[in-house]
Image: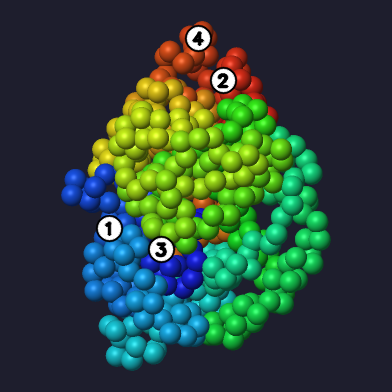
Amino acid sequence: MAGGRRRGGATTAQQNAGAAPKTGRPKKPVEEPAARGPDVDSLGFQAMDRNVPGLSHVILQKLNMKSYEDYKSAMDGRKSGSDFGIRTYFDMFQKMEDTFKFCAECKKLPDALPDPKSLRRCKRCQNVYYCGVACQRANWPLHKKFCKKLKLVALDRLVEWLIFTGDIPFPTESWTKPARAVEGWEDWFSMQGQLEEKLSTILAGRYMTLLWANAGKPRPEDTELRESVRRLVTDFHSRPLTIGLGLRLFGIDPLAKALTVHVVGASHVETLNTRLTDYDELMKMFPGHWGIEVVMVGVDVVDGPIMRPPLAMPAPRGRVYLSSYKGLYHDFWESHVETKLAARPDLVVGFHPGFHACPDLLAGWLPTLLLLRDYRLPVLFTVYSEQELKSSLQILVELETHIMGFAANPFASLRPEQVYSSPNKAPVYCSSYYIALLGPAAEAMPGAGELEDDDGWQGEEPSAAGAAGDISPGLG
Ligand SMILES: [Zn+2]
Ligand SMILES: [Zn+2]
């Protein structure tokens, strides 16, 4: 749900359903038809059932779906929202919460208990459930490490609904500082005029009131709600700003010409309920830019407003234009880029590609990774955690890709998300780290010999490394 995902109770639950094994996040693409291997969503389902047997069925049932295939076709936009059987706000929030109801210690689902209503929620975090006092006590030594953070997770999960209603994000203006001077969210928030008033407007809004009238939890203090709204604002803008960061790192200047960015391996996470204006913060980031087209490419791209053909012409001046292609990236390349039906990308971005997760996913990604490498396209990938960063880097090194650099992402989402079916783990954050790639390892870098022991940005690199120099690598 973090990132593009989101929007509405049913959606959130579905996205949970798509949680991937390691991070609990809806993941990506599998750049491969299902027939050739399990995709990440079904892997997520399997992982969920390993942790809490039967949980995937509960989720499907709450959404009035019978099988993973149903879920999948809903994701593909072949089933309308009304088919989810949700009639009232209360119903929606209940169903959403129900998908989190299982004993965090013994993993029993409500139906497995003599009295399904005996499942009790932890009073502190209002996030995890227990079948009884014995399980709660047994779980506390572990849960106490995460209880505080899980409280924020549970809060943000509800407040996320305001992205669906349009209350979040608040209206923004052109950046008053150059992009290179904005080092992270603190700087970004400092540029937002009347920030407190804008947050107050959201807190006083009709939907915030409706939310707490139906959520089945007491409305938190305003200070807590403000913090939650701020975290969700970062979550909303994280992807466009990460694209902007990628442009900056590679020294690609939006003020010099119209640009095309491909989001490779896009899925429902990036495309479900995505509006035409969702990446407009890029316009604010680069005032006076020539136009930026962002094309979502992936087999799991969902039908919606942004499902329109990529442009053969440069993007309209001063605008951010979203378009989509449902299919594999190398097919798109052949049918659209080679034939000039779509522009060659100035930058390719992949949010949590997940190719490190298992051999099947890597096999699905391989043609794309090789294409990106051999056409020497500037690529920025993001990952959820340091562990994913390490395993992804290892694969990219094995593929002899030239790694320009990697670091903590200054525009990572600040919204914590729990690993869905095993809550007692450190929460993860969308796009926590980035990896920048350009071409094959040896050739891309004249004079590589003297630099080969260096992990981070290579000091003597051409424009890309120069532009990136001010971002220090997160890992050594
Ligand atoms: Zn229990
Ligand atoms: Zn707790």
Percent of width and height locating residue 92: 46, 80
In three-dimensional space, the C-alpha distance between marks 4 and 1, rounded to whole angstroms, equals 44 Å
Q: Quadrant of the C terminus?
A: top right
Mark 1 falls on what kind of element? helix
Q: Nearer the viewer, residue 273 or 133?
A: 273
Numbered label tally: 4
Percent of width and height locating residue 415: 57, 58
Q: Which residue is mark 2?
A: 458
In three-dimensional space, the C-alpha distance between marks 2 and 1, rounded to whole angstroms, equals 39 Å
Do callouts 4 and 2 mark residues in contact (Cβ within 8 Å)? no
Under mark 4, the amino acid is Pro
The circle on residue 65 is: none
Q: Earlier in the sequence, mark 2 or mark 1?
A: 1
In three-dimensional space, the C-alpha distance between marks 4 and 2, rounded to whole angstroms, equals 12 Å
Under mark 2, the amino acid is Gln
Do callouts 3 and 2 mark residues in contact (Cβ within 8 Å)? no
Q: Which residue is mark 4?
A: 446
Residue under the point 64% across and 61% down: 169
Mark 3 falls on what kind of element? helix
Q: Nearer the viewer, mark 3 or mark 2?
A: 3
Is residue 461 positioned above or below 87 on the image?
Answer: above
Crowding around mark 1 (Cα neighbors within 10 Å: few <14, some 14 to 19, many 20+) is some
Crowding around mark 3 (Cα neighbors within 10 Å: few <14, some 14 to 19, many 20+) is many
Q: Nearer the viewer, residue 74 or 150?
A: 74
Residue under the point 65% across and 28% down: 256
Residue under the point 47% across and 53% down: 306
Q: Earlier in the sequence, mark 4 or mark 1?
A: 1
Left or right of 287 on screen, residue 110: left
Mark 2 falls on what kind of element? loop
Do callouts 4 and 1 mark residues in contact (Cβ within 8 Å)? no
